[in-house]
Amino acid sequence: MTILVTGGAGYIGTHTCVELLQVGYNIVVADNFSNSQPAALERVREITGNDFITYDVDLKDKQSISTIFSEQEIEAVIHFAGLKAVGESVAVPLRYYQNNVAGTINLCEVMDQFNVKKLVFSSSATVYGFSDRVPFCESDPLQATNPYGQTKLVCEKMLQDFADADPNWRIALLRYFNPVGAHSSGLIGEVPNGIPNNLFPYMSQVAVGKLAELNVFGNDYDTHDGTGVRDYIHVVDLACGHLKALERIMKHTGVHTYNLGTGKGYSVLEMIHAFEQASGRKIPYKMVSRRAGDIAISFADTMKAKRELNWSAGRGIDDMCNDSWQWQMNNQNGY
């Protein structure tokens, strides 16, 4: 079975490609390398010992997507491709809607044309918005509060409409919480462009000496230590969740929505201390003002994924920190 992986050269995409290849799937990767590097796919080949076809394609170019489906026998799609920085989405919202929404429309139109109607979609816990009721459950009201989250929410609703209109569609919507960590080989991991937006790559770069100190955004939240609490999930566990979702849609039509998280929350300060333990390095930090749009606590209700996918996250905070540190030490300047 051949799976098209859009955005397959990215952080979560590469780890999912590894898991797909290791259990016997064939893959085709489509990526425009705007936020990733071809070298990451060479690392996937090195880890798995498998080769695969790659297309340098932008999903805004519908004809290029059609070329992939004309040349390859695609049976299902895992769709990661899209822009993902919340702050950037506020500054340039139209770019996010063009990439994330229009690109998904193009992809689905071509899939429909070639009668490929199995899709695993990369969504986000940002669709839960400012809700203060935790854990977040798949049936909770949705209220994205920034353009990035809105693009995910629009795509979710759009895909539900596709399936309502055509019962042959089989779609899994996966709402990620906070992906961290790296492959245990140390060969693939997260490579942010410029100054990292996320906690783990920022901590890693401080620990290795590339950045002077970490900014902790807010110490006055209603949490046990005043810093924000998040559900951090190891990227390999997250990748395995995609395989379970793929298996699910092979057997069931309609739209199926799942949270992918651990169901546990850790504060920023707890993660800093855990990373100091893993790295043996002190991580200087300073408290700064809250970021607009951040909430105090976010973690997942994972019971639906456990029940329907037979999936749960197996890697803990020590694995997350150790694997992130190994990746950073082995790849101080990325790929």
Image (cartoon, grey):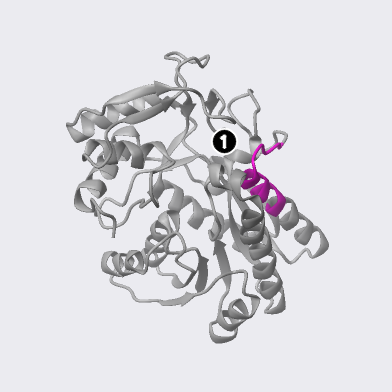
Q: Is residue 137 left or right of residue 186?
A: right
Towards the viewer: 94 or 150: 94
| Quarter of the image where one finds residue 271 | top left
Please provide percent x and percent y for residue 185.
Answer: 24, 54
Name the residue type under label 1. Answer: Met
Q: Residue furthest bottom?
A: 71
Task: Assign the magenta stretch its main secondary structure.
Answer: helix
| Quarter of the image where one finds residue 43 | bottom left
Please provide percent x and percent y for residue 261.
Answer: 49, 38
- At 48% from the left and 68% from the top, the residue drawn is 31
Say whether residue 153 is magenta: yes
Q: Residue furthest right?
A: 165
Say whether residue 310 is magenta: no
Towards the viewer: 265 or 101: 101
- At 59% from the left and 69% from the top, the residue drawn is 59
Q: Where does the magenta region start and end?
A: 142-155
Please provide percent x and percent y for residue 213.
Answer: 30, 31
Please provide percent x and percent y for residue 72.
Answer: 53, 82
25, above or below 10, in the image: below
Q: Is residue 259 left or right of residue 321?
A: right
